[in-house]
Amino acid sequence: MSACTFIVSTLILIFTQVLLEADPELISCQDRFGKSPLHCAVAAGSDELVRLLLEFGADANVRCHEGLTPLMYCCMADPGGSKVKVLQRLLEAGCLVDLTDYRGRRSAMHPVTLN
């Protein structure tokens, strides 16, 4: 990780912590697609941000409008396994591995078994 990337990552963590301390309800906010801060942190592969959000009480099984959980995002974005720490944090937080999307087509295991 370059020095610049490290600084930006650290600033994002600090900023997120300050926001959540000021307004704990932000942990449950969702964008227009239903993605939560945890979905976004998982998609970005930020282990430390995932840790922080879970410490502040993020729901590890929160679903977006399609019914996708952060665990599903992690497995779809990273079938090769480079987000192992993020995956481990989600599992330790109690993610349910057998949930499917709202159409019943995808689970966290589908991308894993296809690769």
Image (cartoon, rainbow, N blue to C red):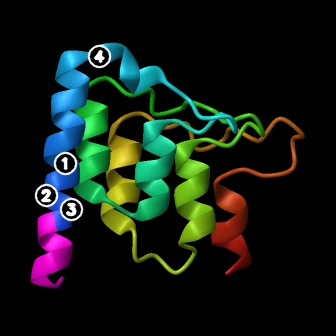
Find out whether the residues at labels 1 and 2 contact each other: C-beta distance under 8 Å. yes
Label 2: element kind:
helix
Give the residue displayed 35% in from the left and 36% down from the top. 93
Label 3: element kind:
helix
State which tag comes first along the sequence, 4 or 2. 2
Kindly identify which residue carries mark 2.
10
Q: Report how far apart the C-alphas of labels 3 and 1 lie in the structure.
A: 6 Å
Direction from residue 46 to residue 98 in the image, left or right = right
Kindly identify which residue carries mark 4.
24
Q: Which residues are magenta?
A: 1-7
Q: Position of residue 41 (x, y in %)?
A: 40, 51
Under mark 1, the amino acid is Leu
Under mark 3, the amino acid is Ser
Q: Report how far apart the C-alphas of labels 4 and 3 lie in the structure.
A: 21 Å
- Figure quadrant of the N terminus: bottom left
Vertical arrangement, residue 75 with respect to residue 54, above or below: below
Find out whether the residues at labels 2 and 3 contact each other: C-beta distance under 8 Å. yes
Kindly identify which residue carries mark 3.
9
Q: Position of residue 25 (x, y in %)?
A: 37, 14
Kindly identify which residue carries mark 1.
13
Q: Report how far apart the C-alphas of labels 1 and 2 lie in the structure.
A: 5 Å
Label 4: element kind:
helix
Give the residue displayed 19% in from the left and 41% down from the top. 15
Quarter location, residue 34: top right
Under mark 2, the amino acid is Thr
Is 22 magenta? The answer is no
